[in-house]
Image (tube, helix red, strand yellow):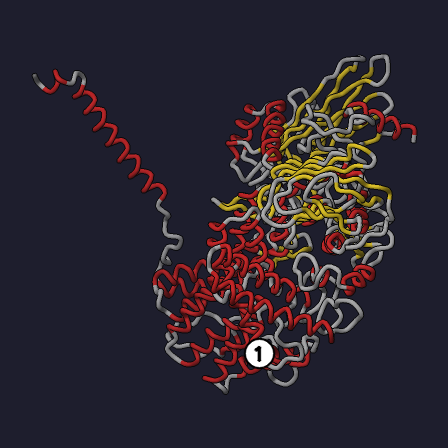
Amino acid sequence: MRRLACLAVLALVVSGCLPGRQKAEPSSGEAAVIPEHYAYSIAALGYPGAQRAFQIGPGSTVSTGECALEWRLPEERGPIQTSPVWFERDGVPVAHWWMVSARESLAFEAAAVPQGPIGDSSLVLSIRVTASARGTGPVEMAVEVGVRARPEGPGFVPWDADDDDGFDEAWDGTLAVRNGRVVAGIDPAADRGDVPPSVLHPAHTIGFGLGALAAHCRARLMPGAHPSWTFWMPAYTLPSAPAQRLERSLHHERVVAAARSAWRDWLGRAARLETPDARVNAAWRAALVTLIQCQERRGSEWIPIGNPLQYRDVWIRDGARAVRSLAVAGFTDLAREDAWTLRRFQLESGALISQRGQLDGTGAALWAFEQAASLPPSPEWSKRYLPAAEAGLRWIERQRRATRELKLPWRGLLPYADPRDNELTRAQLVGNDAWALAGCRATAALARRAGREQVARAADSTFQDYRATIRGALRRAPGRDLPAAWQGGGRDWGNLSLGYPTGVLPADDPRLARLAARVRSAGAPGLVAYGSPDSIHTYLGMDLAQNSLLAGRPAEARAALATLLAHSSSTFGQAEIFDLPSGGFAGNLPPHATAAAGIVDLVRNMIVSDTRDTLELALGGSLTWWEGTRFERAPTRFGVLDLAFDHPAPNRLEARWTEVRVPTRVRIPDGLRAVEALAPGLRIVRGVWVECASGVTSLAVRVIPGPRATRR
Amino acid sequence: MSPSRRHPGGRRRRRWSVLFSVVVAGGLVALFVTTRRAPEVVPPVGGFAAGAESLNAATRRHDWAEAEQWAERLAVEQPRNFQVIYELALSLHNHSTAMTPRFNRPRPALRLSLERIAAEMRVLALLDSAARLAATPDDWARAQLLSGMAYEGLGLPIEALEIFRAVNQRSPKLAGPQLRMRWISAHLANPRVPDTLFTSGSEPARPPAAPSYPTGSDSTVRPDSTQPR
């Protein structure tokens, strides 16, 4: 326990994150020390465009999924603590972790970047290990680095990994070679033993654990001296010659500098968000990093994938969420290109389908097109997406017509689906219809923005009829709330989106509240249990949280966000599902892109919401967020906005924002009531809302303590 | 005043500009040559029959990747041969949807759903072509049946049902389309109907493996024996 405390203090001191230094600013390589809430500390070091990423952790291990480097202190007799893995304070995914014994500490720094010689779909990981003595006298120390196929603990196997479980291992100078391919490079000072396996005399290893390739880095540690060693790893194994060339060109400092520069550039393109809550700011940046890491490049196209490690594939249902979140975060071009990629899933019939039986794909893709074209509004992109949206709309109409003509018990809706995914059933799924309905509305909006009023009216007409059909079906559907499938049964999934974002039902529909009450976890407030009550889903509850926000119950949304952050990794990544008591996530490693998308969208809507026809500010309802929140270059359906919330005196709130052409209203935080407008053009409604006249771009109101209960 | 006097160095400049043009043109030609895509498929060495035998052998081994390669080569040679186009669609479908186990976990042959859906789109287009090329009602029905099954595989029952109905209308005696129609219709009405309800009697719900490639001109293969896997 004492050692753990030492480790935590050391980490805090090194990172400069002791209380009072919470403000985020460009770091100079300082780690953001965040508690690890999962059973294993795992982070992903990827890069936009690459087709693989590195798994960092658990423990002192880095891995490509088919090869891993592991560091140990073999001569240390006492306990050794390994810290969680952390990224840097400004969100840059340069990994830091520590190994600490009673005598010495090792600081690890790792960064991944593309390198010209190995192509832009691969990456190279550079790791530097710096040793320090912890006592006042000199210490003889040795750190061992070993090559293994997979980390001990949770890991993943890339789709394109070799099938081998037997390896001919050899050293080729400083290069670690397995089955004739270079898997890593080690520091020239490392001792590979008296008779190391060589290319001519390799050692044969069976299995995925440590093999015959190990080396020792030895030093006599003097207080104040910090010897270091560097290692590197390609994301894809290399032949010897290019590996040697790569090794000669690699310098750890340059790799880290390049990673920092590139990631700061990426993050700098986003809308600038700063709230008084340092954790929220860090989680926002971490979520953006995850979303950007989950971008592959194929030719000229960006492709949104599900996870940088084990889910390197595209699901429309996840890609659409990525599009929305990238768009609201200010990555306008990337969001539009991702959405443009989704059109490639369109069959001749107009259906958009990424995985067999996932009939929500058409509606979700149409919705994503509209998100990309409206954040901020773009007639050009609307025109570009419209043909695909029209074809998708025709497919939806045809499906509905067919189920009517067939006189199915649940007609006018989409047919049955067997998505072989989270829904765990074959049935006519309520969520599929919700997304298809959202697709109809999206098509109308695209058409209107593209100047195609006739198409817009036709899409509107389909939307109205479809919504009436769904609402009629809901009235006779089984259960008190909203079922997963029209036939009943199945696991709750798409039905959780009937309020936000599909808009089938208004946010204050009581069935949505009853559904939330049924599915939310008692142990993880605001999040949803998936299957077992102890299995908590990190993003499935986000739509319900958004719904609470819109329904005037922001405390539920804040609870969801707080719980999610309290069950995130030490780099603010989220596993898709985790076990509440143990924090385990089996092979479903963090970070999941859709959870990241959920955080971005929820945080943004808590500050500025354009879901309805009014610009709504400060829906999150937290007084804390009025203490200096700034959101700049934020795309909305009403234009790109800058806004600021301030609480200059205990009885005064102020806000400023960019002018928009729609009505604006501002929510007074929970626990306060607005009693007097201190600027012209403001109207206080029930003490909870301030409605702003057209053209008003600032607010100043006098507030008094008020009841916590909130209403729309 | 000679032009060279009027423009000192002009000839040299002209020479350089000519040289520059030649270099640029040469570069463009080189670029064109180097970036020209080589034909994706080379016709089979040893003639069509040998290629067909290789396709048959690959199909028997369920080596769909190789079967697809052979079918591609045969299709280059005989792009209007129904059987070739049909077999290409079948092997492409089976290759792109195959889930080969690795480390005790299934792995798709194509990593990205974008690639898998693109392959299925091509399968559907090939089957459409095959149906147009079909010389006999049986061939047409085979192509359509496989097309319907591909839609089923995608999880699109309405599209599949429409195709099976069309086949049934033209070839009412064929058992395969009837069976699939019944299956889909029943599941549209009640998606929870057990699959096994349709496996009784002599009609198999899941027909046997794809046939060998017939080297003759006629196919006597039953439509319902072309089930994609």
Could you tell me which secondary element the residue under label 1 belongs to?
helix
Residue under the image location 49 percent in, 67 percent down? A349
Residue B33 locus on image (x, y percent): 32, 42
Residue under the image location 43 percent in, 65 percent down? B53
Q: Label 1 lies in what chain?
A: B
Say above or below: A467 vs A527: below
Residue under the image location 24 percent in, 32 percent down? B22
A168 vs A589, nearest the viewer: A589
Query: Tag 1: Cα neighbours inside 10 Å, few (<14), some, or many (≥20)?
Result: many
Mark 1 — residue? B180
Res. A701 in view: yes
Looking at the image, which residue sits at the far left? B1
Residue under the image location 69 percent in, 26 percent down? A27
Say above or below: A278 vs A590: above
The count of marks equals 1
Name the image quarter holding residue A703. Answer: top right
Res. A156 in view: no
A228 vs A114, nearest the viewer: A114
Query: Is A144 situated left or right of A387 in this image?
Result: right
A557 vs A258, nearest the viewer: A557
Image quarter (top left, top right, bottom left or bottom right) of the C terminus of chain A: bottom right
Looking at the image, which residue sits at the far right? A2
Residue B190 locus on image (x, y percent): 68, 78
Image quarter (top left, top right, bottom left or bottom right) of the N terminus of chain A: top right
Residue B8 locus on image (x, y percent): 16, 16
Name the image quarter holding residue B170. Answer: bottom left
**Amino acid found under the numbered disc labelled 1:** Arg
Looking at the image, which residue sits at the far bottom? B173
Query: Is B219 situated left or right of A207 in this image?
Result: left
Name the image quarter holding residue A677. Answer: top right
Residue A360 locus on image (x, y percent): 62, 62
